Image (cartoon, rainbow, N blue to C red):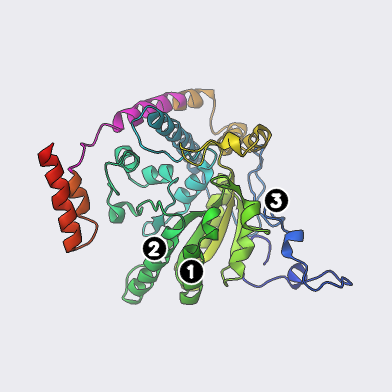
Amino acid sequence: MKHGTLDQEEDVTETSSADEGDPDPFVPPATRHPVNRPDPAMVRILDDQGRLTPHPDFPVELSDEDLVKALEMMVMVRRLDVEGTALQRHGELGLWPPHMGQEATQAGAWLALGDGDQVFPTYREQGLAHAMGVSVADILDSWSGKAHCAWDTVATHFSAYPVMIGSGTLHAVGYAMGIQRDVESGSARAAVLDFHGDGAMSEGDTNEAYVFAASMNAPVVFVCVNNQWAISEPTTVQSPTSLFRRAIGFGIPAVQVDGNDVVAMTAVLRAALDHARSGKGPVFVEAWTYRMGAHTTTDDPTRYRTADEEAIWGKTDPILRLQTYLQDRGDIDQEWLDGLAEREEAFGAEVRAAVHENPTPVMAELMSDVYAEPTPDVLADAEEISSWGEDN
């Protein structure tokens, strides 16, 4: 694979099975591309110090206004996470999956998506959901138990959260195959953007999704958000070599990108979505990032991670990186940052109020959308639930 491109042609010297003169013909790729190190070909445009270096294969087509909006979005995404965690601790939510540290993957996707593209998220893309039109109240309802999926997935182009790890990949590919047939009937071209974690790559559903996507040439972009940990399991337990290289074995062009670099995320995802929309088939993007918080609010990461590890990753903070770049360019100043802090506080109050915004649903009615036409079992269950309410 050429450095950073979506070309499937492999560099023969890079993939040779053994070094010249080595008697072992089966030298594992992990010796050169271990899973716990960024690949030499990883796409990075904005470094940890906020310095921008153009990439030859992924041009930056972002205005200063785009980047300022991205910074504000990432700040609000982080505040949503802080408030969501606090609401769960206060007993207002049953569960909350923190996403601190992964803001650039969501902001980059937001800047890259086309009007007709559909997102299939993990359960961490809360910020992207809100940016795409899902209300804060509807997001919180998913974690308070008030609703399965409170928003219109067609109007927002944002699908329901998959709680079963890896299951969303199959849904995404099926939807992408539907887009193919719509295009054949004259509809506008579109693509699917599927998010899944590094842990989902160990699931059979996800690997089957790769097979179908490659075989059917489906217009889907897989974004593996590699935050280094699948609950308490590090990536080294799941794979010996870089995750994006595994996709190549399915016949899917793949690239690794710095997931804490919103500029690189946008540039790569725009190219990948263009590739998929044009009928060239699926693309795999590994976003190299880190989950700064717990897996969910039921998890204690101090039992399996070190403070030193978290401190090292803290220096790659995607928000500080972009803020430094914009300040150095003079696109924002302290006055703008002070205004942002005020807007952030207001948004925090909005999130806290939103948890009580939607009424508590009638339990039996929650079963009305399990199937398009309720089965006898579902109807019987709904009737039983209704009788409980009458008895109480």
Gap between marks 2 and 3, in whole Å? 31 Å
Considering depth in this image, is 360 or 378 the residue closer to the camera?
A: 378
- Magenta-tinted stretch: 341-362
Q: Nearer the viewer, mark 3 or mark 1?
A: 1
| Residue beneath disc 3 | 37
For the point 65% across and 35% down, the residue is: 306
Residue 208: give its label.
1
Q: Earlier in the sequence, mark 2 or mark 1?
A: 2
Identify the residue at image location x=39%, y=44%. Answer: 131
Give the secondary structure at mark 3. Answer: loop
Label 2 environment density (alpha carbons within 10 Å; few <14, some 14–19, many ≥20): some
Numbered disc 2: secondary structure: helix
Q: Quadrant of residue 302?
A: top right
- Residue closest to the eye, 143 or 328: 143
In x, y percent, where is residue 86? 42, 28
- Give coordinates of residue 333: x percent, y percent: 54, 27
Q: Are marks 2 and 3 in contact (CB under 8 Å)?
A: no
